[in-house]
Image: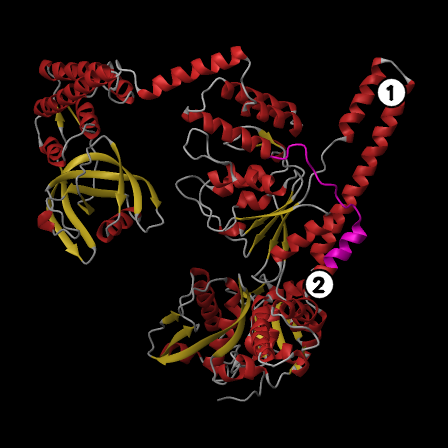
Amino acid sequence: MASEPERTYPSELPVVALRETVVFPLTLQPLAINRAMSIDSVNRALSGDRLLFLTLQTTEKDEPEPGDLRPIGTIAAIRQMAKVPTGGIHIIVEGLTRAKSEQVTKTGESVRARVVPVPDVVVRSLEVDAHVRRLQELIDRGLSLASGLSQELRGLVSGIDDPLRLTYLLSSRLDMKADEKQHILEEDDLTRKLEVVSTVLSREIALLEMKHKIESAAQQEMTDAQRQYYLRQQLKAIQDELGEGEKTEIQEVRARVVAANLPESVATVTQREIDRLERMTPASPEYQMIRTYIDWVLDVPWSTTTEDRLDPGAAREVLDADHYDLDKVKERIVEYLAVQKLKTQSLSRQGAASATAGEAAASPTAGQSAGGATAGSTARIRGPILCFVGPPGVGKTSLGQSIARAMNRKFVRISLGGVRDEAEIRGHRRTYIGAIPGRIVQALKQAGAMNPVFMLDEIDKISAGFQGDPAAALLEVLDPAQNHSFRDHYLEINIDLSRVLFIATANQLGTVHPALLDRMEIISLAGYSEEEKLHIARRYLLGRQIEEHGLTPEVVVFEDGAIRRIITDYTREAGVRNLERQIGAVLRKVAARVAREAAPAEQHLQVITAANIPDYLGPPRFHDEVSFRVSRPGVATGVAWTETGGEVLFIEARLLPSGHHNLILTGQLGNVMQESARAAVSHIRAEAQALGISPEKFDSHDLHIHVPAGAIPKDGPSAGVTMATAIVSALKDQVVREDVAMTGEITLSGLVLPVGGIREKALAARRHGIKEFILPARNEPDLAELPAEVKDGMRFIPVRTLEEALKVALPDGATTA
């Protein structure tokens, strides 16, 4: 006698009600979970021991009640889980044992059951062995038919000696109604289970035999398509004998192959496919698939490249003409061109020297040297793989276009936002209907050259799906050690991408695949200061918008004061995209006024000043609210980094009479931010006497910390100093200085640790009129990257401890509320 392996299960499990599906023990079963109550049960199982109680519901209700569930079900373990875009969940479960629910409770969307395992008992007897032998014979009989059962069953059945496992496996694979499967699951007698499965399998075999007989009869008659194929082949042979065959498209394709100057490996594959095509009739479904494949191979510019402009000085002039500032990016491109120029000159000298040596000596050694020089002269110079990281509107995409223009290369842009299928990068295999190459091959076709500038836009917004991870597929594309032999699934030919200059863009690095990040050179593009935005608007945006709105500089004059007011009162952004949009809104109204003039001679000069900007754009959208927000004790001004640039953050602390030592945190704070708040409170309590705070306040009050804009999730350690300052301000009933902003991570001992995004944070503070900026002392080297007008207009105070920050934000003798 044998039974299922003994195992201890929890007495209470989350329940998933199944419709038209029965999960058996000892089997794997995929399930699509869409109902809210089932999703809740799966989530509860995943957060615990991953066990579920799966049972069949007796009704078709979307929200079944406990009385609608069968008492006998299966305890199953979740082996795999994946979320789907529509909001459901796909899981793969493994049935472990039968179980009986003694009580089912439903609370809201949560359904749980108290279950008792009722494992099957297996008694090996001659009758059981006879039933097993019968099942194996039936499966062999079904597989012998032309359209038999799945070939997987032969291997599965032959490798299973356990009659219970065999019974449940066949029950899950056979076409049976849910009630029949439930009957097998509830049946305690193993012999009876085997009889039911044998009956169902015999019925399936009979259906297969009938289908085989019908197909055999149909194959005896010649179809119209076969008859047409036979006649067409005869006609082709007659035309060839008479010499009347016209120029076929096969000959045209062969001519294209000769003109394309394909590499030897590509030409071999193409000729083989053309030979296959020639042996087929145009009526064959595969004919058009092969023809499309050959067209795609010939559309790739295998031997076409553009000549690089290897003049660093001229390239810098082009970059300066298209973009203001961004010196780090421009210097990197100039360095790349300088290296290419020197490398090309070096290879040319080596080739000339080797050629001279080959002419002067006819020995084998001289011949080998000449061959080596030839190989070296055609060596590839690997291009850099740059990644521009910065908030929207700072010019990442347009900078890639300028780089292509500076280098005299073709430019192609691939948008990766929302891509979740690996085939988007590598292409689809030709076995699928409608297969096409991936975006890399499509971009090469669009560029018409093998050395374009590839702009991989929004690389941080790639997501993985059921079809694979596109970020992992990009590893081969962006790895300099692999991309010389990139292989597209559709073409199945090695493609050399080593001469491509790849430029990726991202708003943040946190969501970029770590292995992908390791292969790229990161260049940060932070936001612009007010002066930089003014220069960009004057040099680039204004002229472009005037032209797009049908105006001329003789008709409209845009004063600098008007641009400054738009920057300060109508746009608070890191980039200049919204600034250009607001300038366009002003010019649209100007265009409407000018168009109403009767004749060009009567058109008046439109002067746009800071005073009349509200006439065009309405009331200012942004106001200086720092002094208003920090006018009371317990409020401190912090700065935060976001993927759209720096933002000013107001953190509030309030004492509540209670005496329970509670700490209340609101504002949708992340785990790291909550830990910073707790660390700040602990340090202040430990150093209360040194900070001039009465310890009795902690004993008689609760503390509430709030960060406004609660609908927006917030996280990160850089608000630690700001939180501590707000807490001390509330405890001392002293107002924080309104012209001070701060950033820095705080430790339990009161040390201030460095944080990132200093440039973005400083620019955000300046936009809000902050005069003094407290930052960690170890971030002081980051100030070198700030624009001169920012460093001149603000005072930066490096601190090492919280006490140093409090001396600046809460000086002795300051006004109290």
Q: Who is closer to the viewer here, 396 or 731? A: 396
Picture quadrant where residue 106 is located: bottom left
Query: Where is residue 680 shown, x and y percent of the image?
Result: 48, 69
Q: Could you tell me the amino acid type at mark 1?
A: Gly
The reply to whether residue 673 is visible in this rendering is yes
Answer left or right for 805 relative to 672: right
Q: Is residue 756 above or below residue 767?
A: above
Q: How is the image coloured?
A: secondary structure
Q: Position of residue 717 (x, y in %)?
A: 51, 63
Alpha carbon separation for disc pair 1 and 2: 51 Å
Tell me which amino acid carries mark 2.
Asp
Q: Residue at x 30, y 19 (%)?
A: 223
Mark number, residue 692? none
Foreground of the two, 347 or 722: 347
> Disc 1 on helix, strand or loop?
helix
Q: Is residue 412 magenta?
A: no
Across and down, in percent, residue 528 comes to: 64, 67
Q: Which disc number belongs to residue 325?
A: 2
Residue behind mark 1: 358
Magenta part of the chain: 300-320
Residue 481: x, y in percent?
63, 34
Give the residue at the far top of this rendering. Answer: 241
Count of marks, rendered view: 2
